[in-house]
Image: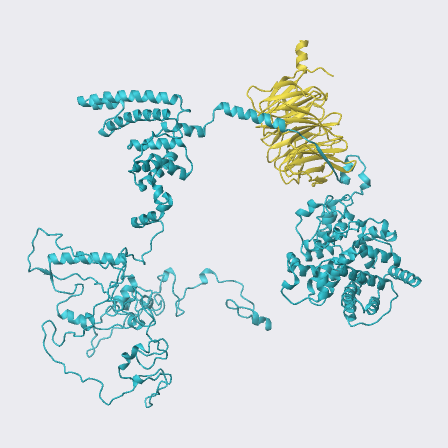
Amino acid sequence: MDEEEHLHRFGTPLEPLEKDEVPAKKPLSIEDQIVKDENGKRRFHGAFTGGFSAGFWNTVGSLEGWTPQNFKSSRGEKAAAVQQRPEDFMDKEDLGEFGIAPQGIRTRDEFAKDSEKEQRTGLRKRKLMQPQVDGPIPGVPVLEQLLRPVRDKVAVRILKSMGWKPGQGVGPRQTRKEKRQTTARNKREQYLLEHYGNEGLPSSSRADDTGDDDDDEEEDEDITFAPDDYEPMFYTPKENRFGMSYSGLSRAPVLSKASTPGTAMQHINLFGQLETEAKKKQLSIRGQAFGVGAFEEEDDDIYARDDMTRYDFSLADKQPKKKKVEHVQQRHVIDGFSEDKSNSTHTQPYTIDLPRDFQPRNWLQRRSRFAPMDAQRVRKLEQAQEHKMSGLGRHDLNPEQRAELLGEVQPTKKNPFKSASSVRNQQERSKSLLDLISSKSDNFTKGGLITATGEEQLASTPAMVELSKELQQSNASILEQAAAKTKNLASTTPSSGFKPFLADEAKQQRYEQFLNAKLKDDEEITKFLADLQPVTLSLWDREMEKKEFIQAAKIYRPLAGLMLDRFVSEATVQAEQQQEQIKPAEQKKIVMIRTKNMWKPNALLCKRYNIAEPFGGALPDPEKELKGKPKMSIFDYLETSINSKANFQTPNIIPKHLEVPHKPKLAPDQHKVPAEPPHKPEEQSFNTVEPSNKTAIAVEPPAIKSNFVPKTPLELAVDASRDQPISEKTDLFKSIFDDSDEETGAATSAVEEEPQQTAAEKLAAMQAALGIPITASAAAANVLRNNSPPRGLFAALFKPSEEQPAAAVPAKFAPIEGNKLKIAYKSREERLKNDKELAMAEIPSEELYGPKLPSQMKQASSANDSKQSDEANIDAKLQQLWQQHAPTKRKAEHWVERTMSSSEDTVDSDEDSSDSSDSASSKAKRAKVKKSHKKFSVKKVKKSKQKTKKKSKKTEKHKHKSRKKKSRH
Amino acid sequence: MPEYLNFNCSKTIDCKQGAVRAVRYNVDGTYCMSCGSDKKVKLWNPASGLLLKTYGGHADEVTDAAGSCDSSYIVSSSLDKSIIYWDVSTGTPVRRLRSHAGGVRCVCFNEDSSIAISGGRDNAVMCWDIRTRRLDPVQVMKEAKDCITAVLTNEHKIYAASLDGCVRHYDIRVGEMTCDKVGEPITYLAQTQDEQCLVAGCQDSTVRLIDCETGGLLNEYKGHQADDYHIECGILQSDAHIVAGSSDGYAFVWDLVEAKVLQRIRISDNGGVVHSLATHPKRQELLFARRRDMYVFTTDLQIEEEQL
């Protein structure tokens, strides 16, 4: 039931089947499917019965048949002439909404008037006649749309009575001329309205075009026309001195419903002081929102504010007596009406001071971004930009101009880029050509043709003949010149090509000079051109010319230039090829590199080759390993990644925040055994798998270091615990999931680890005293902490090393599991550190935000290896060692329960692993306790240590030994 | 040192199978095969130019072929990613081996023709057991980083040349893969008769002689044009001359020791790339493929002429 509540249902459920009922399997066949109307009657029928229903409910052909109307006539009762309507022959469906004669309720035309038409067409004839809405709700009042007057408005009726017809304009009848003028004016106004909107009409209304069209036909004055029906513009007079279209704070009451200003219903009156005049009116309290019955007196508005204006100070009747309305027939006023005497309309509206350069613009009209700017704006922009182009005014003059102004003698102009002679040549050449071409073009424009056939055409008139001859000559000379030029095409100057500014010779010359100068920089060009251009040229023209030149230089590149770009002479290509051929020959210095790798030939391959399998088939088979494991577990993947790749190189994992503390340690005294970075176990694990990787452990290859992306502490922890059996990974999981409980313990233990490494010598001494084989490194020292025998892959590797004197064991064979654990423990602290950003280590503790660390902890975590902390740590280490080798007793401690439980958890899975994890956790605890009661709680700790009951025999033995030794001491 | 005799064309055979992709002698050189772009392998008598058999069944161009030691089977590789093991006499495909992920470029038999080795564009060398009906390769070597262009084998080694510029020796006896990196894409590989050296035709228009034992570069032979073609090279039966095709319609014969061009054989006047060649296993005879034709060049002709 509960489940069903959570289900959503879609569609209609099938009817539940009865027990005995056999569900109809067959779907309805097509012939059985019947179309029915809303009454459940058959809609269509067979072809024999007429297709559609025929007769009364399809009675045609049936027994009843199509019964005709009974003929009934008697003397008294004559058969009435029956008026038949089309509806009589229609079906009900035909009268329905979708039938041929639909009958429904809809508004009659009288009522469905403009508004509906407007709604339908989307056009509103009188756009400006929108009702003015002052209320807080914008838009046309809904009621107004809903309710329509049945009859015309009174005003309309009056108008009609005065001879107005719908469609006509209002006003005195006009003559033809007048009407034309008004229509023109109306049109213009309409246009303005469309373009500038309602409010933005130019104030200076243009004077009526009075005499612009005096028509020839003088119409009779007596033929008059009704004025056009056009929508007049309504201007709202400006009644205040606010800015255009600005309305101050609205005086309309927002909270109370007072309909007229000045009534008592205003709770908050912003203009209380200002509205004294308005309040002079007699107060009248009108209906309230609710709660007033027919026989009840209305309560006073309890929120109404009382002020003195609401009280009368005299007994005099305030309201002036109404004057009797004089029924004086006035001239222009319809009978029964009087002229409006109120002077409200006569108040002078305030004028608006428009800024001088104000340009009306319809802001409602959207303008395309790509539409050209209007000229005025462009000019304005350019003016604004001008100073940027030309600098301040003094830069507008070039030296020439200045010289002219100063009356200096102008030196002969020299183009700095070109020798004078060449310029002259150039000019001459271009001039001569120019002349020729211009003459030619003259002919051309006159309609002559330069072709030989054209000559015949022109031969009709003698003048033309002369011309054509001249033309021929010029053509010949052009051809000659062209031939001469094409000869040394490659060497010709670029200017000799196209001449875009033929019309203006001086300009063309300037252009050529510009081309010759081959300037690239925009400023340079302006400068260069400024030298050339005459003073008479305006700044604008100068700019334009510059642009033109640049453009022309781009477009009208001389043919030679174009060709030079696209074609290369064969000789150069060959030369290049030769060079290419020569070059690689020099470079070719093939160095053969030989690398060898293990490769396992398949047994069958060996068999087919008649060769015994190498190493008796004992070679590792990487392919099989990959193939043989169809299931993919993360641990499988991790293992294969280590084992399979023969040349796998482990990146050196040196997280920055761990490396930092070691550097200063190495610096002060070199003879000290260098502390090994905590990442080492990682590398070792790989080294043991792949012995060929001979990189020394103590010396870290910097190249690898550099490209290694530092791992997060958690990743490190995961790496570290990769090879551990799952039961041993509880620490990792704990470090991942357990947040608060072990935080401090883990942190302190991790912190404690570092000094332990640095004080290797002291440790060694202590170890020697205890009879423990001296290990060279901190990692090796960790062996001591791991009491469980190595197993799995490590069993083979480390068992001998433990039995041998440890001094002989090279550092890289240091057992792993202890280190792994260490890393697992560190992870917590590292995570914390990581969170604080690596750089935070340098920040003085005072600046750190957050709860203050305990002083001891701060000391340790600050990672400065001051002597004091070192020694303290060494002390701790010594204590630990002492505890390890001291006789054990059992004593319950307050933190014992936790470790017990953790050990119990793991006991089930594996005894060995439980052992190690147990010891590990206890170690963490121990460290924690040690930190807190460093000096005085040694004994307590010692006892607690005993609590880890399950120890391998070996370690037990070891302890016995040490105990004996101790006792000897 | 034997005196060098110029090669002369003894026979021109129009294979009529589109472009000839490869020409190969059978084990004793009495027959030859041509692999065509019309997806067929043709067996010829090179001496008479007689077409003996056509083997059709590939789905794409045939790239290489090899005859078995007893000349009763042919194995051919094709760009349709398959290798077909043909029965010579009946002309029917005995086995079709498909495991390559790309077109197969080269194929060869081992000495007793029990294993076929193929290399393909999928950078893999595959060893196929021909004796059994196993359809998947016995061994796959995927060390190459680029297309395998040639495979060779001898009693205990498999050589694979790849476009990644390496020649890989798979030593079955030692269980070791040796990679000799030349640095230039290798388009073809041939072996001297004494199996001491490899002749590698490289993409940089150089044929290189590589010492199998040390991996050292013994000599370089230049003069021909490889361009972007899969130009094959070979070493003559006497182990004294090296021959390679060229993209300009010539074939070059060098002296092995002096690296001197001894003969520039003009295969055809019409140009065309001489991309494939085969050296006769017993005699001074060469087989070239150019466009649609197969050319047989011998030194014997001259002798015959002299005799006549």
Relative to B145, A87 lies left or right: left
Measured along the vertical axis of the image, is residue A347 above or below residue B157?
below
Q: How is the image coloured?
A: by chain
Q: Residue at x 21, y 74 (%)?
A: A80
In the picture, which quadrant includes the C terminus of chain A?
A: bottom right
* Chain B image colour: yellow
Q: Quadrant of residue B290?
A: top right
Q: Quadrant of residue A114?
A: bottom left
Q: Position of residue B137 (x, y in %)?
A: 70, 40
Q: Quadrant of residue A325?
A: bottom left
Q: Position of residue A294 (x, y in %)?
A: 32, 88
In the picture, which quadrant includes the N terminus of chain A?
A: bottom right
Does residue B299 appear anywhere in the picture? yes
Relative to A378, B76 lies left or right: right
Relative to A441, A745 lies left or right: right
Measured along the vertical axis of the image, is residue A74 above or below residue A705?
below
Q: Position of residue A684 (x, y in %)?
A: 77, 50
Measured along the vertical axis of the image, is residue A331 above or below residue B59?
below
Measured along the vertical axis of the image, is residue A725 above or below residue B301?
below
Relative to A596, A349 lies left or right: left
* Chain A image colour: cyan
Looking at this view, is A717 or B174 the one in front? A717
